[in-house]
Image (cartoon, grey):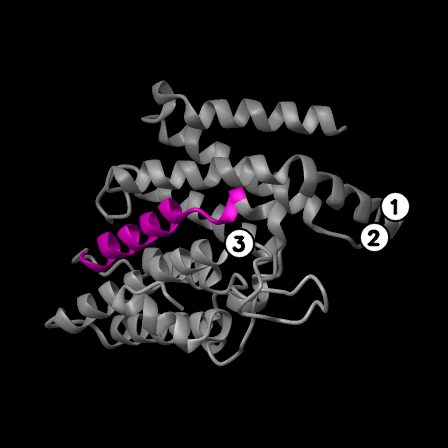
Amino acid sequence: SEVEIQNLLSQWQDLSNNPTHHQNSLLQSTVAETLLALMNEFSSTKSTGLGLPMEWHSNCRKSFEEKGLPMLIRCAFDRVISLVGRGSAQYGHPHHGQCLQWLALVEEVFGWFGGNLISGSTSNRNNSGGRNIAIKLDNKWHDIFVRLDVIQCLFNARAQAFNDQSGDLQMLTSVNSILVHFGSLSGTTRSSKNNRISNNSSICGLFSNQQERYMYAHTMMQGVLLTAQQISSQQKDSIESTHLNMLFVATLVQRLVNNFSPNTLIFCKDGNSNN
């Protein structure tokens, strides 16, 4: 039932947030794996071998999306911020593996909203850069996804992994994918009168207003510029790592241009919000 699911999520969230359990990597990894399994359980809208109708699966998914998913996403974001803040994106950190598991959960969150169309599986992720795909969410998801602290945390995680001499491509690949998802959140605005895309409307879907939309794009663009500087200053790097880094920058910029327009991004680069 909805109450049971919410109680279960509350218990797992308490375990994740309790400082006394933060050093227990096995417990924290179990929490991440359980939340991932729970989300996957409700992600399907198709009938199974048990013969339950499609309508039943659709209703379960809708109920979980309304009552359970927001709590799960907040838990995942907050845990990643905590882990990255302690340097766990670096390969040699004791909680590095745990950080990867929580990032895997965050990546799967975007798959719930169609983000799998952007990154795909690990095997074809690098071939998806040419498609213009937007994840369109309405304002009820505002408090969940319009979090600049999460975006900044992810760029910090990327910097930690990039500067790691071990060549940890798994961490880079995971963080890159999530940042591309954030860049793919639709930045278009819609007019309430004709429902057409408009850059002047105060009704911005996911974003509450134009200034907030600008600050989101600004945070993303500043992270891209910092990443580009890191790549250009790297004196020696493997061909595979260089390709991964350059593809990430190109893909993220393409998604930002598609969702926020070139003019907005130019203002973001120059630090001017009068667009």
Disc 1 and disc 3 in contact, CB within 8 angstroms: no
- Which residue, given by chain and number where applicable, does mark 3 sit on? 207
Identify which residue is drawn at 72% across, 24% down.
3
Q: Secondary structure at mark 2?
A: loop
In the image, is residue 84 above or below residue 110? Answer: above
- Which residue, given by chain and number where applicable, does mark 1 sit on? 52
| Quarter the C terminus occupies | bottom left
In the image, is residue 138 above or below residue 25? Answer: below
- Which residue, given by chain and number where applicable, does mark 2 sit on? 47
Instruction: Measuring from the top left, give residue 98's x and y in whole percent.
Output: 37, 40
Using residue 214 as the reference point, say whether residue 185 is left or right of it: right
Magenta segment range? Answer: 143-163
Q: Which mark is residue 109?
A: none
The residue lying furthest to the top in this view is 20
Identify which residue is drawn at 52% across, 43% down.
144
Nearest to the eye among marks 1 and 3: give it.
3
Whether the magenta-drawn stretch holds residue 165 is answered as no
Instruction: Measuring from the top left, give residue 123's x and y in whole percent.
Output: 48, 70
Q: Secondary structure at mark 1?
A: loop
Q: CA distance from mark 2 to mark 3?
A: 35 Å
Task: Give the amino acid type for the residue marked by disc 1 in the picture.
Answer: Leu
Q: CA distance from mark 2 to mark 1?
A: 6 Å
Disc 2 and disc 1 in contact, CB within 8 angstroms: yes
Q: Of marks 2 and 1, which one's residue comes earlier in the chain?
A: 2
In the image, is residue 273 above or below residue 124? Answer: above
Task: Give the amino acid type for the residue marked by disc 3 in the picture.
Answer: Phe
Q: Quadrant of residue 23?
A: top left
Q: Of marks 1 and 3, which one's residue comes earlier in the chain?
A: 1
